[in-house]
Image: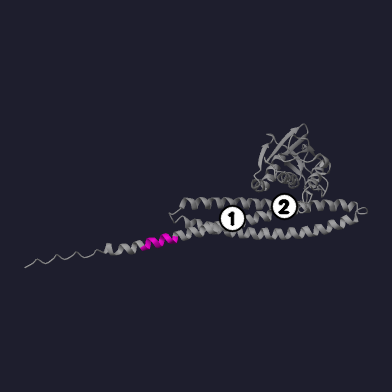
């Protein structure tokens, strides 16, 4: 009689549960991957909004520079009303138009700021979700940190633009020229970077203090940096050098670029209002004219000096020797 085969041992619970556990882990991994993708999409949306914000800031700066010059023309034309009735009327119309544009741009910038704040909160939440996963964790965290740095920088620029664009009485105070140059450069930094322009400094070690309005003084160097940026558009070597020194009772600031320079036959006209060598629509011809007016109002001098290459502007101010007086410069 043949022996009966031995019965197979019963299947353990662990072997039955293995496929179920693997499926649960795969589902959790897919959820983490989905959260990481959401964080990346929010980061790209933030970068797009910041690009729009930079464009709005550029428009606001251009409109404000034009308005400053027209306001200065308006004050001068009012004292010469008998000789320039037509020009006064045109200036008033242009000022009303520019003020309307400035108001619209300011509202747009505030809307962008609110949108940027919402995206920042979304990024913070996305960062928390991303830390739950182990797939590409280091790359995601690095991208989030860069985005947060960009948000902080944009917030600082917006805060400074509000101060720069705020209409307020023009008063004088003791101002460190080097601080003014650094603030102007902070506003122009992104534009210079996008144009691959290198900035070289040679600032005096000592404090260079003048009596003036810090916002108007800042406008001088923003205009000179803008002029250098445009001049270097097609230059093979793009560099701007800014130096400051004290010579006796004078403070001298030099802004030089490596562009093509200014032709000798038009050098006498570069500070004239509305004079420009750019094509129609490429510039208002107001930048250097506004700069000249502000320098003069502060008791200083500005000139185009001879240099081996590019254009070199030299600005001089008297050293502050007395306490500031609360009064209008206009």
Name the residue rendered at 86%, 50% in the picture: 76
User: Crowding at label 2, few (<14), some or many (≥20) Cα neighbours within 10 Å?
Assistant: many
Q: CA distance from mark 1 to mark 2?
A: 21 Å
Q: Residue furthest top?
A: 248
Point out residue 270 in the picture as x, y percentages from the top left corner: 81, 44
Q: Nearer the viewer, residue 102 or 241?
A: 241
Q: Mark 1, mark 2: which one is toward the viewer?
A: 1
In the displayed structure, 167 sits above or below 254; it is below
Point out residue 29 in the picture as x, y percentages from the top left corner: 41, 59
Q: Check if residue 24 falls in the magenta segment.
A: yes
The secondary structure type at the circle numbered 2 is: helix
Q: Check if residue 219 falls in the magenta segment.
A: no
Pointer 1 residue? 47
**Quarter location, residue 177:** top right
Query: Going from the N terminus, do you reach mark 1 or mark 2 first?
Result: 1
In the displayed structure, 181 sits above or below 308; it is below
Name the residue rendered at 64%, 48% in the picture: 194
Q: Which mark is residue 61?
A: 2
Q: Residue furthest bottom?
A: 1
Range drawn in magenta: 23-31
Name the residue rendered at 55%, 56% in the picture: 43
The secondary structure type at the circle numbered 1 is: helix
């Amino acid at each position: 009689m043949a022996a009966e085969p031995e019965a197979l041992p019963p299947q353990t619970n662990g072997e039955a549960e293995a496929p179920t556990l693997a499926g649960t882990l795969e589902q959790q991994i897919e959820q983490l991957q989905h959260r990481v993708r959401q964080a990346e999409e929010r980061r790209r949306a933030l970068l797009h909004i910041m690009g729009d914000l930079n464009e709005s800031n550029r428009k606001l700066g251009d409109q404000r520079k034009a308005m400053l010059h027209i306001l200065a023309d308006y004050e001068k034309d009012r004292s010469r009303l008998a000789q320039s009735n037509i020009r006064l009327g045109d200036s008033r119309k242009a000022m009303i138009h520019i003020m309307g544009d400035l108001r619209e741009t300011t509202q747009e910038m505030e809307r962008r700021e609110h949108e940027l704040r919402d995206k920042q909160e979304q990024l913070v939440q996305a960062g928390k979700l991303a830390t739950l996963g182990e797939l590409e964790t280091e790359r995601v965290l690095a991208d989030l940190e860069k985005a947060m740095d960009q948000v902080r920088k944009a917030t600082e620029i917006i805060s400074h633009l509000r101060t720069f664009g705020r209409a307020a009485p023009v008063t004088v105070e003791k101002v460190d020229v080097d601080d003014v140059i650094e603030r102007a450069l902070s506003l122009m930094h992104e534009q210079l970077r996008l144009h691959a322009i290198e900035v070289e400094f040679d600032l005096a070690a000592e404090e260079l203090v003048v009596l003036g309005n810090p916002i108007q003084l800042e406008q001088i160097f923003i205009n000179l940096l803008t002029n250098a940026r445009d001049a270097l558009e097609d230059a093979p070597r793009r560099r701007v050098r800014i130096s400051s020194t004290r010579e006796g009772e004078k403070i001298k600031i030099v802004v030089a670029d490596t562009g093509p320079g200014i032709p000798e036959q038009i050098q006498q006209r570069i500070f004239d209002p509305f004079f420009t060598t750019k094509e129609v629509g490429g510039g208002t011809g107001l930048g250097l004219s506004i700069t000249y007016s502000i320098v003069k109002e502060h008791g200083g001098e500005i000139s185009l000096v001879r240099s081996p290459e590019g254009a070199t502007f030299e600005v001089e101010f008297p050293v502050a020797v007395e306490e500031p007086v609360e009064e209008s410069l206009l």
